[in-house]
Amino acid sequence: MDKLKLIESEFIKKEITQFNVGDTVKVLVKIPEGPDKVRLHPFEGIVITKQGRGIAKSFTVRKVSYGEGIERVFQLYSPSIERIELIRSGKVKRAKLYYLREKVGKAATKIESKEETK
């Protein structure tokens, strides 16, 4: 086995919720508040892209807050991520949802869910 893959395999063992582009997720991020204090800060939005492979996987989450679009890129296997909760599953036909950047209001957050179409 490749030495790089052997090292990566230790970090990839972290249990991750399966999600895809178009899903609404809540990412709970650890924020240090002092030398021994940590609080969890939620960031809830739509996954607009997933990229990378192995330990370098990352995903971008977009939310609209007070009329302003906010995007945040997370490293999937980062130790600062406590957990990822799947809020709603979305049905999309594209791998990258960059077109949501031009949308405003409800159009920016409304993605058909897989359950609604059945």
Image (spheres, rainbow, N blue to C red):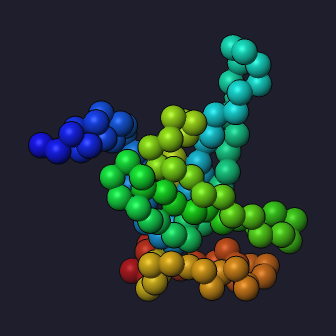
Q: How many marks?
A: 0
- Using the image as rendered, state which of residue 65 and residue 90 is in the foreground: 65
Q: Quadrant of residue 44?
A: bottom right
Q: Quadrant of residue 14?
A: top left
- For residue 99, side relative to residue 7 (left or right): right
- For residue 100, side relative to residue 5 (left or right): right
- Using the image as rendered, state which of residue 93 and residue 59 is in the foreground: 59
Specify whether residue 87 is in view. no
Identity of the residue drawn at 50% across and 41% down: 78
Quadrant location of the N terminus in the rendered image? top left
Identity of the residue drawn at 44% across and 85% down: 93
Q: Quadrant of residue 5?
A: top left
Q: Position of residue 112 (x, y in %)?
A: 53, 79
Identity of the residue drawn at 86% across and 71% down: 67
Q: Residue furthest right?
A: 66
Quadrant location of the C terminus in the rendered image? bottom left
- Using the image as rendered, state which of residue 12 and residue 114 is in the foreground: 12
Against 102, is 83 above or below? above
- For residue 11, side relative to residue 67 (left or right): left
Q: Position of residue 15 (x, y in %)?
A: 36, 39
Q: Residue furthest front?
A: 3
Against 80, is 88 above or below? below
Q: Residue furthest top?
A: 36
Specify whether residue 25 is in view. yes
- For residue 80, side relative to residue 101 (left or right): left
Q: Position of residue 107 (x, y in %)?
A: 70, 83
Identity of the residue drawn at 60% across and 57% down: 73
